Amino acid sequence: MPHLSVNPSSKPNCSTVWLISVLLGLLAVHTNANDVLTVPQQVSLSTNMDSQQLSISWLAGAATTFDLMILRTELNESVFYETVSVMVSQLSGRHEWNWTSVEPLQCTSLSIKIRSREGQSTSEWSNTEILQGSDLPSEEKCQMFPPDRVVPVGANTTFCCIVKEGKQFGTINYGNTVMNTTRLSRRSYATTVVNQGLSGSSGTNLVCYNSFKEIEIGAVVFVGYPPLPSDFLCETHDLTSAVCLWNERRNTNLYKTRGSRYMLNNRTFTLSWSRNPKKEYRVDHWEVNWTLVVVNPLGQYSLTDSAELSHRVTPVAPENLTSVAHATNATVLWQWKYDGYSSLALVCQVELTSQGYKTNHTFSGVGLRAVVLPDLYPYEDYSVQVRCGAQQNFWKWGSWSETMSFKTSSIVPEAPDMWVWMNKDYTGQVIWKPLTGRQSRGLMTGYEVTLWSPGESLQHTEILPPDTFAVPVNLTQMATASSDNMVMATVTAKNTEGVSLPASVLIPLRLTDADPRAVSQAVYTDSGFSLFWQSDVNTTCSYVIEWHNASCKWNCPVDWIKVAPGNTNVSIESANFQPGVRYNFSLYSSSSEAPELLQRWQGYMQELVPSSPVLSLLTTQEDSDILLTWGQIPLVSRRGFLLGYNIYISSGSQLTLLANLSDPGSRSYTVNGLSEGSYKFTVKAYTSAGEDTGATASIMLEPFTDWLILEILASLGVTALFLVIVTFLCYKKRKWVKKAFYPDIPEPKLPGDWSRSQAPLDVKPPHHSLVHMVERPEWDSSKEALVVIPEEDEDEDGQGIGDELVDTDEPTSLRYYNQVVDERPIRPRYPDSSDSSASSLDSARTDVTYTGIQTSGSSFVFQLDPQGSSEGHQPQADPSFCAGGGGGYRPQMQSRVPSDDTGPASPNPFPEPQAASGYKPQSSWQMDSPVDDGEGRSRASSLGSPTSIASTQFLLPDGEDHTEEKRQPSSSAATWLTNLLSSTKP
Amino acid sequence: MADLEQDEQREQTEQSPALDSPLPGPTQTGRAVSIARLLHHECGLLLQLYKEKESFLSSYSPDGGRMVSPSPVPQEEASGEQQVERLHAALRQCLGLLHSVLLKEEEEWGEQEEDYETLKKNVRHRLEHLLLSTRGLLEGPDTTLEVTPDHQGTEEPDGAGGLFGLKVWTYRVLLELHHWADHAAETLHVFHMERGGAADL
């Protein structure tokens, strides 16, 4: 823009002139510019409603750049406003520009105006041209645009609904979907459907509802594909016309008026609607070049083909097939629809079907219309169909003819496949396999079986019906009547055409039980039992392999196959094989002589666990062992090769494996090392498939009485021997024993008057003296006395005191007090090593001073029995005995207590005196007494006990010792022992 | 469908001697009532099937009058024969509409779903059969009734409505068929009662 500036310092006149000049100049420039930019004139509009295209043309001189503005007239909304470059059309001399609207052009009125532009300069806008929409008030009815649109899959389409005058817009539904809408005018609303999917056969509905949810108007949109044909070619069947074929690779989803239209070499044609994608169209005359164009509303597709007629011959199907059948061949004849085929070189394929199997035979010839089919089976049903092609420039096979059936004629049957089963005697059966349909070659009428002895001309023939395949034979008579070693069995089959050739087997009459062939194990595989054998290269005989259930022994239903010479292996498969069944296979040589057994096998198709356990499981006790024995499982129950046995012992529900016997021939097992009790054993045989359920037997293991008796006898013998030895030793050492246990007690010697002496009475005791203390229950202290019993009064039998300890020491001087000296309480006296009376026992009333008590060592040992010392109820160290002289000789007192003692047996019995008195033997003996412990027991136990005193002392009974005892603390047995030992010192 | 066809065959077999009878009896009228009721049932099925096919029609309620309008006869003065005759005329117009539907649908859509096509054909045959029956009820020495489709006076689809209009029009035709089949069953039942037929058909 020109820039104006005023300088106040300039002179007014010059400045004014200069300013006017500038303004005039600017005005002139502007006027010139307006003259160049022509305002567009004669704006014209034309529309293509289907393509929604608006064509605008105008006159604008030489201008090439224009501003275009398109507004929705009613709402004055800008739809398009851009600067475009438009050249003048040479044809019309006008500027022309096309604009495609998103919405259908009928949706609402559009205002269009244009102005020229050159750089930043523009002309005035042209007059506004209005494209009238269908929403004008004058058109009151409801409308929807576009009404019936065909669009490709995936397209986006904008629809608009113009509601009826006076109604309010509601919604627009596409199918069942409520769409978002845009208001275009007072009555017009638009919606855009994006990425449209295939519509149904009658299209997809677009429905416009008013505010009352009533249907105002609707439209139908069809969504499909453009055509896509393929595999276009033309061929001829009649050698004149053409049949053009193609495939519709894709269903366009458009039908009828919107469906595909076709043009072949610019000739339009229609095809009846069909779901089959394979299309064809026939043209009367062959043309070398062919062009197919397929068109639908969404697009078009063209294909071409080019070929000579002779290269595109596809013969029609042969017609009217007939046949002339014989036993092993047949002639098939047919006719051609077109005469032109008579000179056409043809190659024909004959498909022969019999028993479900198809075979193809190919023949050729000019105008071929008959062929001979060789190598047919007699009495067989066949069906046949034929198709042909051009032998030269073969294009493709023609269509198959209709199927024609025929049956070949019958002839005599084949010789049956026979075999002989012989039992261990001269009985058996002749068996043969049923002839198949093809082997019978006609309607079977029966079989003829002949047994004959070639040398003796003995013959026996039997006619059998056609459903018989075995006949029993008894060769006993022939064996006795014939001198031959062989009998020949012959079987022939008969049908309506005659008798077959005979099949025969030689049967040896001298049967032997010897079976020299070892039995091998046959393994079953997917192809059956695989059998192998050694072949003698010099022999040319064939083989027969026979098999049967191994558990069958008599007239067994055998099966067999024949093996050609030279083979050394075969796989035997049969539908009759059963799992768990043992089969015997025998290989025979098949020659002019009788069959010779070459090899044998046994095998299972599938081994199973035995179906029954071992038989007769028995348990037997052998000494302290248990012997298990059992019988073998029957063959039919084994169901596999036995590999061994497992021996289990059961405890509750648990089975514990005792042993695994891998020898299948085992029949027994010995269980060792079991103690007495009840046992249950289970024996399970096993095959490769596993164990059977097992047989169980129980046994109660009794003590082994013989051994017990032997043990008792042995113990008794040893005891007796010991006693004998002891007796013998005692006898041999009787003097020593006597001396040790029964020393002679010298009589007491009483020299002088000792009764009055107040001094201690020194007495030299006799060598042996026996002191008896007399005691009665009603003992009274006033009657206390010591009675010296002469030695000769001793019981030599060991009764009474005679068993008591004997002092074997030399007699020592005893100091006797001639009377009871005082009534002092008992005071303890402890052994004095220097005094012989140190171990004397004080009595409550009597002081007895021991000058010595000599006791044999053995007696001590006996006294010092640890048991005695440890017995609680026999205290060994009662201090009362140590202090009280009255208790010093209690054993005698106790021994005198009668069994009916009731008086003195106080409830508080005496404590055991041994500890202090040093008289252990009684105590020890008492230990072994079976009577109860306690005082009473002590006393009772003294009765009859062996008591021996080897003493020179006088012992005073003590009736109050218990009082003294209470005053004395207890002492240990060691103290007692020490006292005793001290007292025995010389 | 198989049951319907069997019924139809049985009815046709039974109908043939009745049509030859000079005077309509209860047996003829009863059979006509049965055919009308069967037609009504099948029209209902066809209507339902079409609504399922064009689901927007479930919210459509036609605001126009009857598409089929036979010449009016005052109800109180009309005899039974006149009522049946009026019914016969209406059924002919219905057949004309149905033929138009079949034709236009074939032009626009081609062969559609099998069950829909089968049911359309059954209704057409049933309607033709009913026309034969009503003619048999009315035909006498002085009257000759047509059984061909009557296209006069029937409303054709509005071409401006496009295919959407065709669908709406087809729906209205099916509604009309359903209505007149029901009306036929009622009218023929009354006629059957007048002729001494049993009420509990």
Image: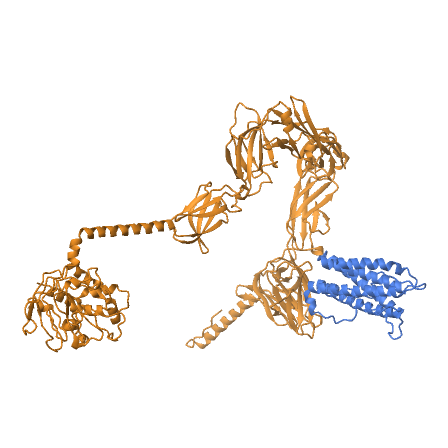
Of A709 and A258, the residue lying toward us:
A709
Of B159 and B94, the residue lying toward us:
B94
Residue A401 pos. (x, y %): 73, 39
Of A189 and B135, the residue lying toward us:
B135
Residue B180 pos. (x, y %): 80, 67
Relative to A550, is A250 on the left or the right? Answer: right
Relative to A849, is A429 on the left or the right? Answer: right
Q: Is residue A574 visible?
A: yes
Q: Quadrant of residue B9?
A: bottom right
Residue A978 pos. (x, y %): 13, 65
Relative to A798, is A591 on the left or the right? Answer: right
Q: Quadrant of residue A651?
A: bottom left
Chosen colour scheme: by chain
User: In the rendered image of this protein, does residue A680 appear above or below residue A822?
Assistant: above
- Image mark count: 0
Chain letter, orange: A
Q: Is residue A442 visible?
A: no
Of A611 and A209, the residue lying toward us:
A611
Which residue ends up furthest to the top in the rendered image?
A: A455
Chain letter, blue: B
